[in-house]
Image: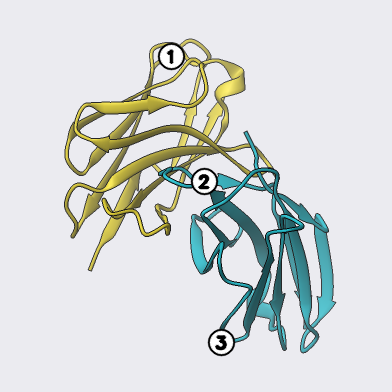
Chain colours: A cyan, B yellow
Amino acid sequence: SQQGEEDPQALSIQEGENATMNCSYKTSINNLQWYRQNSGRGLVHLILIRSNEREKHSGRLRVTLDTSKKSSSLLITASRAADTASYFCATDAPNDYKLSFGAGTTVTVRA
Amino acid sequence: SQTIHQWPATLVQPVGSPLSLECTVEGTSNPNLYWYRQAAGRGLQLLFYSVGIGQISSEVPQNLSASRPQDRQFILSSKKLLLSDSGFYLCAWSHSSYTGELFFGEGSRLTVL
């Protein structure tokens, strides 16, 4: 079953703008991760944030986590055409080996 | 470095025919292995995962089965495909110590006609 839900489902922005997408989940988590999927390809891990962390940065990516609201956001700054992809959040529960994925946000960056 | 191979990349099969998708991992030992299915425009549904040879956990009762005959080999099978089995199948692995991150293969697109 899907644990996370991303919002919005789709996002279209101009190159150079920032893209923000959100993820909400339902049950307690151990980690929350964000993955990227180019059309027709496998998923690539972007960033992992632990349940006791509130914010994390990696290059042009910034992730926040609010466990009280059971939500996370992914910010991509200064977007590029190559950032066009679908972005998924994924969560795992304590003492669990499994990741549950949301339905994803499709981001289109216009040149 | 670790790599994951998944094949075939594309498959068109008639209803009622058998299925075998294969996934192998190189460069690591005793990985956790996973099969996910992705319907068009949707998220990923976990089908099976394995923490060791011969140890398979099924997440969703369905027409599919999985086997792990060797440490780094994971096979997804069906004896008789249904139309609803169409989709994009993704194999993934994680470290046996499970740091959280999954590493995905390039996927196998199955169309059942």
Res. B19 visible in picture: no
Give A91 or A40, whichever is nearer the viewer: A91
Q: Position of residue B39 (x, y in %)?
A: 64, 37
> Of helix, strand and loop, which one carries label 1?
loop
Res. A97 visible in picture: yes
Give A44 or A109, whichever is nearer the viewer: A44
The C terminus of chain B is located in which quarter?
top right
Please name the residue that numbered disc 3 is placed on. A59
| Three-letter code for the amino acid on which mark 3 is drawn | Gly
Q: Residue at x 43, y 53 (%)?
A: B106
| Three-letter code for the amino acid on which mark 1 is drawn | Ser
Compute the Cα span from label 2 to label 1: 37 Å
Please name the residue that numbered disc 1 is placed on. B17
Compute the Cα span from label 1 to label 3: 47 Å
Which mark lies nearer to you, 1 or 3? 3
Please name the residue that numbered disc 2 is placed on. A93
> Of helix, strand and loop, which one carries label 3?
loop
Specify whether B29 is left or right of A71. left
> Of helix, strand and loop, which one carries label 2?
loop
Specify whether A69 is left or right of B111. right
The N terminus of chain B is located in which quarter?
bottom left
Q: Which chain contains the residue that carries disc 3?
A: A
Q: Position of residue B56 (x, y in %)?
A: 32, 27
**Whether residue A13 is situated above or below residue B61 in the rendered picture:** below
Q: Which chain contains the residue that carries disc 2?
A: A
